[in-house]
Amino acid sequence: KAGVTQTPRYLIKTRGQQVTLSCSPISGHRSVSWYQQTPGQGLQFLFEYFSETQRNKGNFPGRFSGRQFSNSRSEMNVSTLELGDSALYLCASSLGQGGGETQYFGPGTRLLVL
Amino acid sequence: TQLLEQSPQFLSIQEGENLTVYCNSSSVFSSLQWYRQEPGEGPVLLVTVVTGGEVKKLKRLTFQFGDARKDSSLHITAAQPGDTGLYLCAGVRNSGYALNFGKGTSLLVT
């Protein structure tokens, strides 16, 4: 079974721009969660989508948004980029049966904001 | 404020040594997971513990969940260079769904 894939793997943007990241979950998984990983804050939960609906949301500003398509693929968008948005963005997929179930992570998209 | 505090933050040891990584919180968790992340990759689940006092063994790795379900530890026996990586604990609170991660322990075995 193919794992979670994320595109692009690396991205360089400048302040004020916007960016869209993509995540393809494991086949059959209906839940996709997004995390931001930085050396200072570690892994922080952004949001989770299940069956095209945002089911849970972390404590991030509205510049961070996402969506999920009918095939469970998900995209994350960050508008008006700030230097502090430089991070590794990870998505994880799961069956969606509830908290604590196994999440399978993709390799991440490393975003650098200049 | 970090919900899960991991210690130590960094650990550099020789092959064959034993080590313990701690994950502590003031909150109660319905379950707690340990992940290992290698450079350029996403975290990979090692184990999930759900019962207070539970001990799970995975070859040379021993995981323990505290009786009160507020803390956990990971003990590695006879560490090998292949154990090098970032070890993350993550928990789901009784009232929640989202995984809350610690900042991780970066382990280097040489």
Image: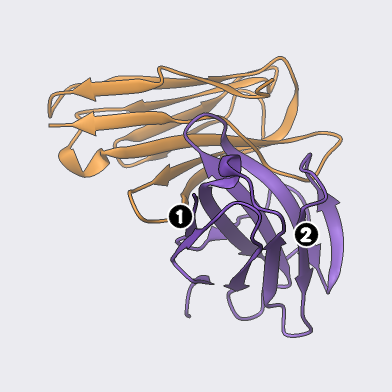
Chain colours: A purple, B orange
- Which subunit holds the residue at mark 2? A
Query: In the displayed structure, does residue B93 sit left or right of residue B52?
Result: right
Residue A65 marker: 2
Q: Measuring 47% from the left and 34% from the top, which residue is drawn there?
A: A39
* Above or below, comparing residue B45 to residue A24 in the picture: above
Q: Measuring 17% from the left and 37% from the top, which residue is drawn there?
A: B80
- Of the residues tagged 1 and 2, which is closer to the observer? 2
- Which subunit holds the residue at mark 1? B
Residue at disc 1, secondary structure: loop
| Closest to the observer, B17 or B57 | B17
Q: Measuring 75% from the left and 49% from the top, which residue is drawn there?
A: A99
The residue tagged 1 is B42
Query: In the displayed structure, does residue A37 sit left or right of residue B75?
Result: right
- Amino acid on which disc 1 is placed: Gly
How far from the left and from the top, in percent, is residue A28? 66, 79
Q: Are dots 1 and 2 on a single chain?
A: no
| Closest to the observer, A30 or A114 | A114
Q: Measuring 45% from the left and 61% from the top, which residue is drawn there?
A: A107
How far from the left and from the top, in percent, is residue B21? 41, 22
Which quadrant would residue A83 be assigned to in this image? Answer: top right
How far from the left and from the top, in percent, is residue A81? 65, 52
Query: What's the distance in space between the residues labelled 1 and 2, CA to CA?
Result: 21 Å
- Amino acid on which disc 2 is placed: Ser
How far from the left and from the top, in percent, is residue A92? 60, 60
